Image (cartoon, helix red, strand yellow):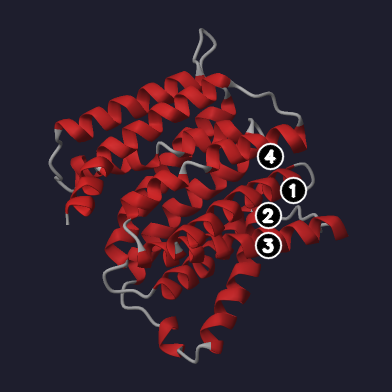
Amino acid sequence: MTAVLWMLGAICSFCLMAVGARELSGTLDTFEVLTLRGLVGLIIVMGIIYWRRQPDLFVTQRTHTHLARNLFHFYGQASWFFAIGMIPLAEVFAIEFTVPLWVMLIAAVFLSERITWRKSTAVGLGMLGVLVVVQPDTDGLSGGMLVMLFGAIGFAIAIIYNKRLVSTEHPLTIVFYMTLMQLPISALLTGGDWTMPTTHGWIWVVIVGVLGITAHYCASKAMQTAEVSKLMAMDFLRLPLVALLGMLLYGELFDWWVVLGGGLMIIGNMIGQDVWRKRRERLAS
């Protein structure tokens, strides 16, 4: 039950962060939002480490791996923020659900992980789900869909690097270097044209910064007390929840194609993780 509550906290944080990103998309440049979000996150993480009296968490011997991970994560994150201002929230989250499928493909190609029929089926269903959601026509995919699709690949590569880091690095160390390295990148990309947020904008900036930390923290806590495969099914609750928020707050139309495509991605991911076999093993033990 504790893991469920932590995962619900992560789901709510991600969905509300998407609302914050949508609120800021019309008033601030994406890289300005990322800069301010990173600044808020860096202050929070440093405060937590100092409060825990663990200054050794600021030290790492794997700077190059952190840098590689954060370059791809920054690309994925920037794409996510761009896409939120261009297409409905439900479409953003549906396309984001292809990340585990890209991870399987990348791991097979670059890490020589074995491609099984289960993984092949998962990837096939996931790609079919993408086609159902984006519904490409003679004009091709929309700009927002393409941005999020390539952003999902960026997230997937970042996850591969993150898997290497978690074997030796504390989660707070990973988050600290994430904010520390991505902050100057986003600041440089803003250029010289800087717009200060309004009072209303500052509120959303702080909310987005805080939610960015709570989302990752809640997800990490949930994974400490339950299997990732069990929590993964819960994570897909983000799709109907963010679709509901899009309808209530921004008048976005309910799209059954998004639901169908998201459902295919869910089934594909569950097959890839072999959720049913793991459940049977737990019941039999």
Residue at position x 28%, y 74% in the image: 168
Of discs 1 and 4, which sits in the foreground? 4
In this picture, residue 67 sits left or right of residue 141? left
Density class for disc 4 (Cα within 10 Å; few <14, some 14-19, many ≥20) is: some
Residue 151 lies, in percent from the top left, at 47, 41
Q: Could you tell which of marks 1 and 4 lies nearer the N-terminus? A: 1
Residue at position x 64%, y 24% in the image: 254
When the figure is inspected, residue 150 is found, relative to residue 139, above or below; the finding is below
In this picture, residue 174 sits left or right of residue 83? left
Tell me, yes or no, whether the two marked residues, 3 and 2, touch with CB atoms within 8 Å.
yes
Of discs 2 and 1, which sits in the foreground? 1
- The answer to whether residue 198 is visible is no
Q: Could you tell which of marks 3 and 4 lies nearer the N-terminus? A: 3
In this picture, residue 140 sits left or right of residue 205? left
Name the residue carrying label 2: 33
Q: Residue 24 bears which disc, if any?
A: 1
Secondary structure of residue under mark 1: helix
Q: Could you tell which of marks 3 and 1 lies nearer the N-terminus? A: 1
> For the C terminus, which image quadrant?
bottom left
Name the residue carrying label 4: 245
Name the residue carrying label 3: 36
Secondary structure of residue under mark 2: helix
Residue at position x 36%, y 78% in the image: 60
Tell me, yes or no, whether the two marked residues, 2 and 1, touch with CB atoms within 8 Å.
yes
Q: Amino acid at mark 3?
A: Leu
